[in-house]
Each structure stands twice: as C-alpha cells, then as structure tokens.
Amino acid sequence: MQKYILIRIVQAIFTIIIVAILVFFLMRLTGDPVAIMVPPDAEEADFKALEQKYGLDKPLIIQFFIFLKSAARGDCGESFKWAEPALRLVVTRCSATMELAIAAALIAWGIGIPIGIITAVKRDSWFDRFGKIFALIGQATPSFWLGVMLILLFSVVLGWLPVSGRTETKSIIMPAATVSFIMLAAVVRLSRSAMLDALNSEYVTLARIKGVPRLYVVLIHAFKNASIPIVTIMALQISHLFMGAVIAEQIFSWPGVGRLALEAVFARDYPVVQSVVLLTSFIFCTVNILVDIIYAYIDPRIRY
C-alpha cells in the first residue's frame, strides 16, 4: 500500500506539471495583457516598460522555465491587475470558496445519501417515485437559472435573504443551494442504484434468512458495500464544487476563487489564472489519493 501511495504521489506531481504547461501556453493565446493595462494614449515606451516589469519581453520558453522554477518554490508571480502576489491572493479567496463548498457538500451528501437509501429500501413506493422525479429535475436544472429564480423568490418577492455578497450568515443559503442542487440529484440516483445492487445480493439475502435485524442489514451489510461508488461520486463532486462555484459566485457576488478566476481571465492576468489552476489541480490530485486509501479501508479485499 505504501508503494502504491508513493506511485500515486509521483503521478500526481507529473499531472500537476502537465497542467502547468497547458495553462501557461493556453493563457498566452488569449492576447497581450499589456494592451489592457496601459491607457489608450500610451506610447511605445509605456508598453515596453510594462513588458519589462512583468518579464513579458523575454522569449516565451524562457518565461515558462522562470514560471516553473518560481512555482516550485511557491511563487506564481505578481498579479497584473491587483499588484500583489498571485498565490497569496488566491489563498485569501479560498476561505470564501471553501465555506461555500462545505455548505454545498453538507446539503448534497447529508440529504442525498439518506434519500437514496430510503428510495432503494422502499422500492416502487410513492417515496421512491418522488426520489426519482426529484433526481431527474435536479440534473436537468441549469445552475444559473436556479440561482436567478432563488433571488427572485427569496430576495425580491419574500425579502427573506440578501441578494448578494458575503455580509451575514444567511448570505450563504442561496449560493450553497444553487451549487448543491445538481450534486444532490446525482447522489440520490447513484446511492439508490448502489443500494439496490447491494440489497439484491446473496450475502444480504443470507443475512435476512439468519434473522439479522433489518436496520442492521441495510446500514451495515448493504450500505458498506454500496459505499465505494458513493465515495467515487463524492470525490468527483469535490472538483465540481470548485467549477460550479464559478457560476454561483458570479451570480451572488460571492468573493471566492471562482469569481476571482473569471475576473483574472477577462483581465488576462496570467499569474492569477495559473495560481488558481495549479491550486485546483493540487486539491483534485490529493482528493483522488485519499479516495484510493478510503477504498482499501471500506473493502479490505482491495489491495495495491
């Protein structure tokens, strides 16, 4: 197992390097950031001064190796737009995004998994039909549309919640609901499917014949074996939390990493975009390694 984890860490490092290469060169295709930074009446000397300041006057390959060497030391350069270290800027915004991600995950997983289990146990009941319809609606509903509808209902019509910002505790309710809704639907569908497979298995039938209490059979025998696909979808959804947050943060003016990334892309702020992508890649790779370790814990038959 230790050898496998070491291999996965090496693979993760290579993955992050490849991501760094892609984001560096793809960002250069978006245009010259100096053209946005200088005023309309700027002269040629102003262009050259800014290019020299940010190292953009060097050949592209030299810029790349400078970036790679600095990133290895935890320095992703200075933001063109905000004039402060890019990585520090991203990390300071992480708390808002993490707050939103945790709230959305608690809603999606805390509600979705119990609903998935109950719909599987009560198959073909009214609750099962409700769960399936709810899952279909959830996966078919666009996040941006849901966010706008929530603002219209709870802020404009009822006046219960603030329209945008991160000013008070209840400000997080609508952004978290928007991000979690599609995740919740996916968790319900997958939990139901995995639990149905487990409940129809021979070992569960044998446990019932032996007279094991029903609740124990469902939660210990069936749910434990249904956990692997559920853990997989939860791991995939962690990356979705960051991508989904871009839309929600923009709609609700939530000051997180997603909104920062969008503003940085429009400003051609290379260091900030590179920092966001590298940090997201690091989180994604770390989560995947942790999921592999959890697999082995849930099912001892899994060995690497």
Image (cartoon, helix red, strand yellow):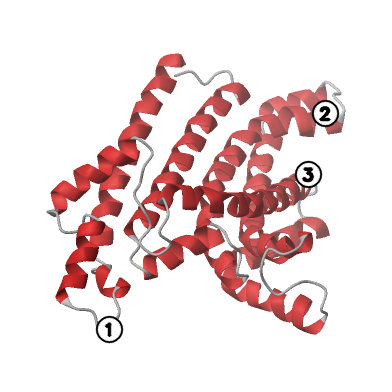
**In whole angstroms, how far apart are the C-alphas of marks 3 and 1?**
67 Å
Q: Position of residue 303 (x, y in %)?
A: 48, 18
10 Å neighbourhood of mark 3: few (<14), some, or many (≥20)? some
Q: Evaluate if marks 3 and 1 touch, with contact meaning CB atoms under 8 Å apart.
A: no
Asked whether 64 or 298 is in front, the reply is: 64
SS of the residue under disc 2:
helix
Q: Residues within 10 Å of mark 1 (few under 14, many from 20)?
A: few
- Name which of mark 2 and mark 1 comes first in the sequence: 1
Q: Please state which amino acid type lies under the numbered disc 3.
A: Val
Residue depth check, mark 2 versus mark 1: number of the one nearer the observer: 1
Q: Amino acid at mark 2?
A: Tyr
Q: Which residue is mark 3?
A: 121
Residue at image mark 2: 216
Q: Quadrant of residue 138?
A: bottom right
- Choose top left, top right, bottom left or bottom right for residue 224: top right
x, y (%) of residue 17? 29, 40
Which residue lies at the image location 64% right of the left edge and 35% below the top edge?
A: 227
Can you give x and y, in whole percent of width and height, for residue 36 in the image? 30, 74
Disc 2 and disc 1: Cα gap in Å? 72 Å
The dot on residue 40 is 1
Q: Reading the chain from its start, which is encountered first: label 3 or label 1?
A: 1
